[in-house]
Image: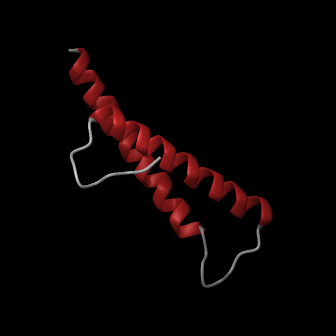
């Protein structure tokens, strides 16, 4: 799936793009955990913590916005 950032992206397309990127990130994280061959110069743990924090924040914000849409 090509991402064209030269023109505005609609909401549905942006959700599809985020879903694809999240899927890729989760597959890569699973591989890091499964093989556990950590390179000390490229530790995945900080990135995993960042991903987790970003997802928690996103869930809170999306739930709030969905509530506004349903009101």
Percent position of residue 2, x then y: 42, 50
Lateral position of residue 25 relative to residue 3, left or right: right
Q: How many marks?
A: 0
> Is 39 drawn above or below residue 23 in the view shown?
below
Q: Residue at x 30, y 38 (%)?
A: 61
Quadrant location, the C terminus: top left
Whether 70 is drawn above or below 12: the answer is above
Give the vertical position of 32 relative to 60 (above or below).
Answer: below
Residue 66 in the figure: left or right of residue 23: left
Residue 63: image x %, image y %? 34, 30
Q: Is 34 displayed left or right of 59 in the figure?
A: right
> Residue at position x 69%, y 54% from top?
30
The image quadrant of residue 33 is: bottom right
Tell me what residue is drawn at x 64 percent, y 52 percent.
27
Residue 22: percent from left, percent from top: 51, 48
Instruction: State the scheme by which the image is colored.
Output: secondary structure
Q: From the viewer's side, name the closer residue of 41 and 53.
A: 41
Q: Residue at the right extreme?
A: 35
Residue 34 point in image, percent of width and height? 78, 59
Q: Nearer the viewer, residue 57 or 14?
A: 14
Residue at x-position 43% and y-position 37%: 16
């Amino acid at each position: 799936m090509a991402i064209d950032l030269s023109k505005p992206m609609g909401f549905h397309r942006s959700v599809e793009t985020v879903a694809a990127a999240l899927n890729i990130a989760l597959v890569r994280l699973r591989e890091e955990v499964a093989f556990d061959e950590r390179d000390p110069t490229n530790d995945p743990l900080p990135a995993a913590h960042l991903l987790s924090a970003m997802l928690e924040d996103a869930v809170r914000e999306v739930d709030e916005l969905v509530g506004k849409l349903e009101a």
